[in-house]
Amino acid sequence: MILKDFIKRRIIITGANGMLGQRLFEFYSTLKDVELLASSIESDFVFKNQNYIQADITNRNELKKIIYDFCPDFIINAAAYTNVDKSESERETAWKINVKGVEYITETARVLDSHIIHISSDYIFDGKNGPYTENDTPNPLGYYGRTKLASENVLKISGTKNTILRTNVLYGTAKHSRSDFVKWVVESVRAGKEIRIVDDQINNPTFIDDLVQAINKVIELRKEGIYNIGGSEVLSRYDFTMIIAEFFNLDKHLIKKIQTEALNQPARRPLKSGLITIKAQSELGYKPHSIIQSLELMKRELGL
């Protein structure tokens, strides 16, 4: 028996009740060489009788005590304020969660020499010249994007071991969270509802299990730096929706094509976006599912 059989990697997941947090917990709870602690702001965890502790990422002393007590090797920060439009009016809340929370994590991680894995977004870009590489210059259009860029900058100057994973249009299976885009499209159209989908926002939608595997590769290889994580297909939100409709045999007449400006949303969206994943493919061995492969997995697991 070799040494690694005795040593468990200690991992904290913040935001464990969110879609990504749940999927991460499901994955890591099956591994025998991992000691796992889930945390989120809610009093109860969606998975019962698990190693869970309530934690407010904006409460500096509370968060630091939890991290110090567990002494993790890795901190996966899946906690975030992700409501793009409300970020414009609830700026203090968005900043506290997305920026100050990251600051508090770094203060403790620096002392413990813990490795932080942080989830960022393509919203740090203006969407004029996408898809983007890791080296392209950020220029966020809205406050949400500004908070995500600020959180990246916190990590860059923190003196910690850290990895930033930028992603976009996250979709996939999470049984206990609100509907993702795919589930929303399927349930809405099956219920006979007309939905309006923009045809001028371009991305490469990210299957959640691909992001989980990228995170695991970062941990296995102990890679630091910035990596783009996205799907293999760059397309408009409308075209993505039509693929979903075709796969699930939905009534396409209920899917109406519109432009972003017609929605009159409080926050501006990057239009020509998407993330080039060549670096992740070469350094992490990242291999994303195709959209059809992802939909097949979702259909099987959720019974859609």
Image: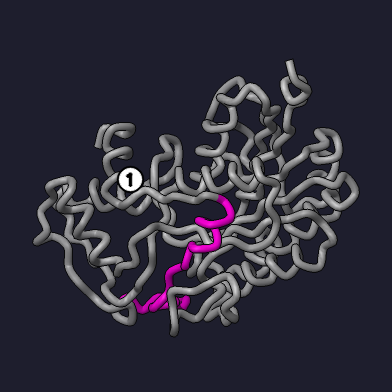
Q: Nearer the viewer, residue 257 or 32?
A: 32
Here the colouring is one colour
Whether residue 64 appears in magenta in the rendering, the answer is no
Q: Amino acid at mark 1?
A: Ser
Residue 84 image point, x, y percent: 50, 67
128 relative to 29 in the view: left or right: left
120 relative to 190 in the view: left or right: right
Residue 13, relative to residue 233: is it above or below?
above
Is residue 89 in view? no
Residue 19 image point, x, y percent: 49, 44
Residue 11 occupies quadrant: top right
* Chief secondary structure of the magenta portion: loop
Residue 90 occupies quadrant: bottom right
Q: Residue at point 73% right, 42% down?
A: 74
Name the residue carrying label 1: 294
- For the N terminus, which image quadrant? top right
Residue 102 image point, x, y percent: 73, 58
Among all residues in the image, which is located at the extreme top?
Answer: 1
Is residue 102 in view? yes
Residue 208 image point, x, y percent: 45, 47
Residues shaded magenta: 263-284
4 relative to 85 in the view: left or right: right
194 relative to 216 in the view: left or right: left
Residue 46, relative to residue 197: is it above or below?
above
- For the C terminus, which image quadrant? top left
Q: Nearer the viewer, residue 75 or 143?
A: 75
Whether residue 269 appears in magenta in the rendering, the answer is yes
Q: Residue at point 58% right, 55% down?
A: 283
Q: Secondary structure at mark 1?
A: helix
Q: Residue at point 64% right, 35% down?
A: 43
Q: Residue at point 56% right, 24% down?
A: 30
